[in-house]
Image (spheres, helix red, strand yellow):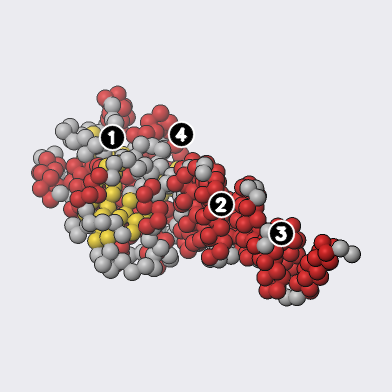
């Protein structure tokens, strides 16, 4: 037997001895073989470990290092995912992950790497760890937000708020957190002396709903900066004077967050933490019992409100009722999506009532149709732009006796101003996540919501609204 054969036999005996030892012994032997330039021996030992312990992160890390050393990048990608999913906090796994990501040098592949691992962590119930990587994935490819499986909707509709709010973090309206990905507030970090940027999202109605949580974060943080739809800036700034309110974005119908100009932040305190407005309920509204008893949160411009009140007073005695029967964006399917105008007859039959138009985008023919059918005069404030001037609309709404609307942003606005509001919609509470499985709309107690599937049901809901308004 020559020297080479004797050396080989000695190595085989060492390998057999290592395999016969405990996991730590085998790992040490595998690492030694890898460092000694014997990838074949190391590979065999790592596989032995995984046969007995399929989630051994250290063994996966060893395999990742072998794959990187042999320039097998795709193999390293698959293996590093297994390592992190097995043990998210493993420092060696995190270090290997960073090296694999650097070796990819491709934004799309980096996005997929982060995303795939986040999905694996999510399936194991490791939601916090999964969120971190999911957000990083969106930085490289915001299109991955479209993979939202809408798991939050049935949970929130069913009243399972804790699980629902967590699932809501994967909502497809958050295309990216841009430069704030690594500053997301986790709800537990102390922000007493910190500046928190709260970013508004989705439509005006959604941004008004989520103001329910703004006092909570303002009470906890040293300084709060609120980014909102630019039409809401004056209204929000007046209502939350301790915050800094800015508006550089506008809801366009797609609902996705957008990142454009951040130069305005140069005039603000440095941002320590960031959170999307729709993520606040996860920390401040984990149960229905955690909702405040009063929903009035917004403050209209007192001078404009006084002027509006004087204009309405000139119309004579009787209650002043604001009405809105469709969305500006859904005019083409008015009677399919919204209650047909005929269902509104109980409202327009109320005695001693003057009806104030709150319908954005009202055209002359539509106004004439409504007035002729119900023999009423629909009063419009001609110099008020109901689409652009939300602050002026709030001033008008704040001095009304009641508001009746279908599903638009308007019921959220009027209820947030503590005005008695009735909203009549097709469908049922099971179709609307914001109801959160409650008997009454939890965000604003002033909002009375009626549902119906048939025209007869909808008419009945309008009758209840009319009774409530007349009896108030």
Q: How far is mark 3 from mark 1, CA to CA?
A: 74 Å
Q: Residue drawn 19% across and 50% down?
A: 267
Q: Which of disc 2 and disc 3 is earlier in sequence?
A: 3
Question: The residue tagged with tag 4: helix, strand or loop?
Answer: helix
Q: Residue drawn 77% across and 70% down?
A: 14
Identify the residue under disc 2: 100
Question: The residue tagged with tag 3: helix, strand or loop?
Answer: loop
- The 10 Å Cα crowd at callout 3, few under 14, some 14 to 19, many 20 or more, is some
Disc nearest the viewer among 4 and 3: 3
Are the residues at dot 1 and dot 4 in contact (C-beta closer than 8 Å)? no
- The 10 Å Cα crowd at callout 1, few under 14, some 14 to 19, many 20 or more, is some
The number of numbered discs placed on residues in the rendered structure image is 4
Identify the residue under disc 3: 38
Q: Is residue 243 toward the left or the right of residue 336 in the image?
A: left
Q: Which of disc 4 and disc 2 is earlier in sequence?
A: 2
Identify the residue under disc 4: 336
């Amino acid at each position: 037997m020559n020297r080479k054969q004797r050396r080989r036999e000695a190595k085989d005996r060492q390998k057999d001895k290592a395999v016969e030892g405990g996991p730590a012994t085998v790992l040490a032997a595998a690492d030694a073989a890898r460092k000694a330039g014997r990838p074949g021996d190391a590979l065999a030992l790592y596989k032995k470990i995984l046969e007995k312990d399929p989630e051994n992160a250290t063994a996966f890390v060893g395999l990742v290092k072998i794959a990187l050393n042999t320039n097998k990048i795709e193999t390293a990608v698959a293996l590093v995912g297994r390592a992190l999913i097995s043990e998210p906090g493993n420092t060696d796994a995190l270090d290997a992950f960073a090296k694999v990501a650097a070796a990819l040098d491709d934004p799309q592949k980096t996005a997929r790497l982060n995303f795939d691992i986040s999905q694996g962590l999510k399936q194991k119930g490791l939601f916090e760890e999964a969120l971190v990587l999911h957000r990083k994935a969106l930085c490289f490819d915001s299109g991955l937000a479209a993979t939202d499986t809408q798991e939050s909707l049935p949970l929130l509709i069913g009243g399972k708020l804790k699980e629902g709010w967590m699932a809501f973090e994967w909502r497809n309206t958050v295309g990216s957190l841009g430069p704030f990905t690594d500053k997301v507030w986790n709800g537990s970090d102390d922000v007493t002396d910190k500046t928190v940027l709260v970013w508004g999202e989705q439509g005006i109605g959604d941004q008004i709903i989520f103001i329910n949580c703004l006092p909570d974060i303002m009470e906890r943080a040293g300084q709060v900066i609120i980014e909102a739809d630019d039409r809401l800036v004056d209204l929000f700034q007046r209502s939350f004077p301790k915050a800094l309110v800015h508006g550089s974005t506008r809801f366009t119908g797609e609902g996705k967050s957008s990142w454009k100009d951040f130069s305005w932040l140069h005039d603000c305190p440095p941002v320590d933490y960031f959170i999307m407005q729709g993520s606040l309920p996860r920390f401040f509204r984990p149960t229905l019992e955690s909702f405040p008893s009063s929903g009035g949160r917004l403050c209209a411009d007192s001078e404009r409100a006084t002027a509006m009140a004087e204009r309405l007073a000139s119309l004579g005695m009787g209650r002043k009722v604001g009405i809105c029967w469709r969305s500006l964006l859904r005019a083409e399917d008015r009677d399919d999506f919204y209650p047909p105008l005929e269902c509104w007859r109980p409202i327009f039959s109320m005695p001693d009532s003057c009806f104030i138009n709150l319908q954005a985008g009202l055209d002359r023919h539509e106004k004439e149709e409504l007035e002729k059918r119900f023999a009423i005069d629909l009063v419009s404030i001609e110099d008020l732009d109901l689409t652009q001037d939300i602050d002026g609309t709030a001033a008008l709404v704040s001095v009304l006796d009641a508001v009746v609307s279908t599903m638009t942003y308007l019921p959220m606005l009027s209820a947030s101003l503590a005005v008695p509001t009735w909203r009549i919609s097709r469908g049922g509470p099971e179709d609307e996540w914001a109801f959160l499985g409650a008997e009454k709309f939890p965000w604003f107690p002033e909002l009375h919501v009626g549902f119906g599937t048939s025209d007869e049901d909808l008419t009945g809901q309008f009758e209840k609204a009319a009774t409530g308004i007349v009896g108030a």
